[in-house]
């Protein structure tokens, strides 16, 4: 059969990736290559010991540790981090941790222009995107800016061994959501399609092994490799209904980020299935399952992840409100999300709330 490649635009984004178990040993070299000599190390309070170890490895190239990263980058935290970077005369923001910490590094980059070196320890994928987010008075603002894309990323699977099994599975499903939606993005391209399918394949194979043995370095490497690819997709193409629903559920109801993605993904994929057959083929193939949505649902359920919004803090009364918000200013989606779709969205959310299969 003749293959017809559709028209597309692909923009390569400049970031350097150093990957492998033990890759942290290249830390000093990477800071030097950025031309930096005073890195401010950012982390959450929970990961302060790791950040201090990193500062110690850097010796005089570390300007200090700022251990105050929290979820969703409150503007006050961002302002305090920028002030600290100025006070210690930092020339680089070094973010070690999950998406919350990378987000703080991006906030510094946005306001000061300092380069970011990211050392991710979850599968969220923020380190591969030029997308920043900040929260003020409960409202999250996001934007795209090339300056916030980390210039270098060190992926060391050994740093993910401590990520609890439960959070590893949900964080991995969060990553797969980027790839799954990237496959039906309006601006998708063949390079991202390859990465998305491979990212889903790597994570689907790795997550059960990570859950069985969180210290399995080979499984952790496969999972982080998949997360890298999925993060690249998130940074390159637009996201659709699934991400809109998760932003609404996370932002408006303050539900936990990775868990929300895990629960909603199979239902969003089922909602779009008939409108994105090629994407479904790739997801199914990557999951080794005859049905993309069901394959994602079973992957989560079989690995102990939550599959019901009611189990992660959502009240039934909020279903109608979330459906209503989702149809206002919707993201582009292969199946139109308009006022007529509100009923179908309520049904989607009802299933996700109850934990029914998609
Ligand atoms: P997180 O960064 O909030 O981390 C969750 C918790 O896990 C924290 O307490 C953290 O210290 C801890 N943790 C992280 N790695 C660990 C490890 N290896 N061992 C033990 N504990 C560890 O969670 P996340 O899911 O990585 O990130 C979520 C945030 O990232 C959200 O705010 C989301 O909006 C944002 N995000 C942004 C983008 C983007 O492109 N801008 C992409 C993905 C996610």
Image (cartoon, rainbow, N blue to C red):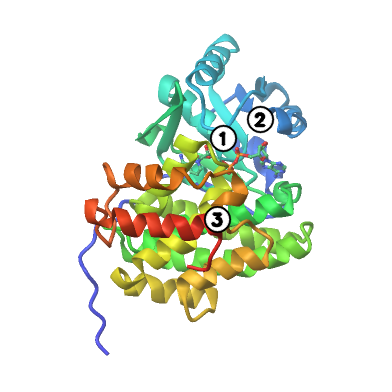
Contact, mark 1 vs mark 3 (Cβ under 8 Å): no
Name the residue rendered at 60%, 21% in the picture.
Answer: 38
Residue ID for mark 2: 44
In the picture, measured across the screen, residue 66 lies left or right of residue 253, that is right
CB of mark 1 near ligand 1 (< 8 Å): yes
Name the residue rendered at 66%, 53% in the picture.
Answer: 168
Name the residue rendered at 27%, 54% in the picture.
Answer: 337
Mark 3 residue element: helix
Residue ID for mark 1: 100
Q: Earlier in the sequence, mark 2 or mark 1?
A: 2
Residue ID for mark 3: 262
Contact, mark 2 vs mark 3 (Cβ under 8 Å): no
Name the residue rendered at 57%, 56% in the picture.
Answer: 308
Furthest residue toward left: 7
Q: Quadrant of ligand 1?
A: top right
Contact, mark 2 vs mark 1 (Cβ under 8 Å): yes
* Position in image of residue 333 (x %, y %): 29, 56
In the picture, measured across the screen, residue 280 lies left or right of residue 160, that is left
């Amino acid at each position: 059969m003749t293959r017809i490649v559709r028209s597309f635009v692909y923009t390569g984004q400049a970031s350097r990736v150093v990957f492998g178990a033990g890759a942290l040993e290249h830390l000093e070299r990477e800071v030097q290559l950025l031309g930096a000599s005073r890195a401010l190390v950012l982390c959450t309070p929970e990961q302060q010991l790791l950040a201090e170890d990193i500062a110690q490895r850097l010796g005089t190239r570390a300007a200090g540790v700022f251990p105050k990263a929290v979820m969703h980058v409150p503007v006050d935290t961002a302002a305090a981090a920028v002030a600290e970077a100025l006070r210690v005369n930092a020339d680089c923001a070094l973010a070690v941790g999950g998406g919350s910490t990378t987000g703080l590094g991006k906030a510094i980059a946005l306001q000061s222009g300092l380069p970011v070196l990211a050392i991710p320890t979850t599968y969220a994928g923020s380190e591969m995107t030029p997308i920043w987010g900040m929260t003020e008075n409960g409202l999250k603002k996001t934007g795209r800016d090339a300056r916030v894309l980390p210039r270098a990323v060190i992926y060391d699977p050994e740093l993910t061994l401590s990520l609890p099994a439960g959070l590893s599975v949900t964080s991995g499903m969060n990553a797969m959501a980027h790839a799954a939606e990237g496959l039906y993005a309006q601006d998708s391209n063949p390079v991202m399609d390859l990465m998305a399918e491979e990212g889903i394949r790597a994570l689907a194979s790795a997550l059960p092994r990570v859950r069985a043995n969180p210290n399995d370095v080979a499984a952790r490497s496969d999972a982080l490799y998949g997360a890298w690819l999925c993060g690249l997709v998130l940074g390159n193409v637009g996201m659709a209904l699934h991400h809109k629903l998760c932003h609404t559920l996370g932002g408006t109801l303050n539900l936990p980020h990775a868990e929300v993605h895990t629960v909603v993904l199979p239902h969003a994929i089922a909602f779009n299935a008939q409108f994105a057959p090629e994407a479904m083929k790739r997801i199914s193939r990557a999951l080794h399952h005859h049905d993309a949505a069901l394959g994602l649902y079973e992957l989560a359920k079989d690995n102990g992840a939550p599959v019901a919004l009611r189990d992660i803090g959502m009240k039934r009364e909020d279903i109608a409100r979330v459906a209503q918000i989702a149809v206002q200013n919707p993201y582009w989606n292969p199946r139109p999300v308009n006022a007529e779709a509100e009923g179908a969205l309520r049904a989607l959310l009802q299933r996700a709330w109850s934990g029914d299969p998609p």
